[in-house]
Amino acid sequence: MEQSALIEIGLPAAVFIIMAGIGLTLAPSDFQRVVMRPKALIWGIVAALLLLPLAGMSIAMFMDLPSEIAVGLVIVAACPIGTTSSLFSYLGRGDLALSIALSALGCLVAIATLPLFANFAIERFSDGDIRVYLPVLRTIGMMLAVILLPVILGMWIRHKIPAFATRAEKMVGAFGLVVLVVLIVGIGISVYGRWAEILVSAGPAVVVLVFCGVAIGFLGSRLLRLSPAEAMAVTTSISIRNAAVGMLLAITMMNSPEIAVPPALFGLLMYVVGFGLVAYGRMTIKPTA
């Protein structure tokens, strides 16, 4: 796919703005909760950024996916926790403080884990079909630029101009949804000639991955005897991923709209699952006083 300036410049800029939106919701005190809730936080990070990518690898192997779809599935499974996971956790009566801490720490951890999982998936599934590798240091640098720096900027704005941060947070959330829709439409146009074939091969795998995330979140939290509110926060963090980052890597660094298809499908389906989690949480978790 021939890259345009809109994709090369516009897509990273859009992801930068979305990640700044996370920063607008964070304060330094949120990081103190890491010490206060170590068991739930550690479990959430391990489940979201280690177990789900491993589940993606297993699904790709078991379903014998085409190489591009397999790599895209692993990439979206390894993406940072989504910008709206805290919102879904809040609406579903989850532990909001834990959800915010998971989002913040998850962004930092994903900077290192995502390029490693992506390259491992390319090595495992490409069979010579995919010749592009993600240079780890360059990818980490790119993710620092579009994940860590905007989060810090957002936190600085919240600290210095809290009233503006409150207003901007809502606008950034809406902007993120628009960007996701535009990306999905653009990817659909890029693979127009093969969209039916790709949808058939990628759709079931993405559905299985999404529901694996829900199962990992609830079952693991039950085994660890987390509270229902903590379990909801962990499960939404696993299920709601920043699919735009996966699409960014696939399109701008790997020049492959086919690899971007699983993140695009996941980006749609995760909202359906998110609203399902909200309904479940409101039916089963008692509101706090």
Image: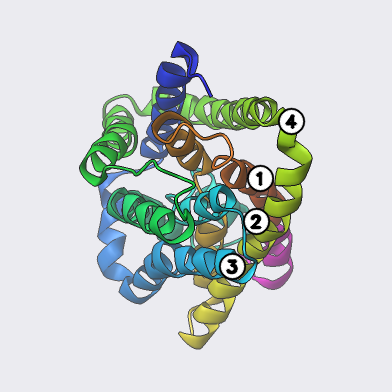
Q: Residue at x 34, y 71 (%)?
A: 42
| Prevalent SS, magenta region | helix
* Residue nearest the viewer, comparing 207 with 161: 207
Q: Quadrant of residue 50?
A: bottom left
The secondary element bearing badge 4 is classed as helix
In contact (CB < 8 Å): disc 1 and disc 2: yes
Q: Position of residue 150 (x, y in %)?
A: 32, 31
Q: Residue at x 35, y 49 (%)?
A: 107
Residue at which label 4 appears: 193
Query: Which mark sits nearer the N-terminus, 1 or 4?
Result: 4
Residue at which label 2 appears: 206
Type of amino acid at the residue the image marks with label 2: Val
Query: Which mark sits nearer the N-terminus, 4 or 2?
Result: 4
Type of amino acid at the residue the image marks with label 3: Ile
Query: Which mark sits nearer the N-terminus, 1 or 2?
Result: 2
Type of amino acid at the residue the image marks with label 1: Leu
The secondary element bearing badge 3 is classed as helix
The secondary element bearing badge 2 is classed as helix
State which region is magenta. 275-288
Quadrant of the rendering where the C terminus is positioned = bottom right
Q: Residue at x 69, y 25 (%)?
A: 189
How crowded is the residue under tag 2: few (<14 C-alpha within 10 Å), some, or many (20+)?
many
Q: Position of residue 105 (x, y in %)?
A: 32, 55
Q: CA distance from mark 1 to mark 4?
A: 17 Å
Checking the image for residue 59, the label placed there is: 3
Q: CA distance from mark 4 to mark 2?
A: 21 Å
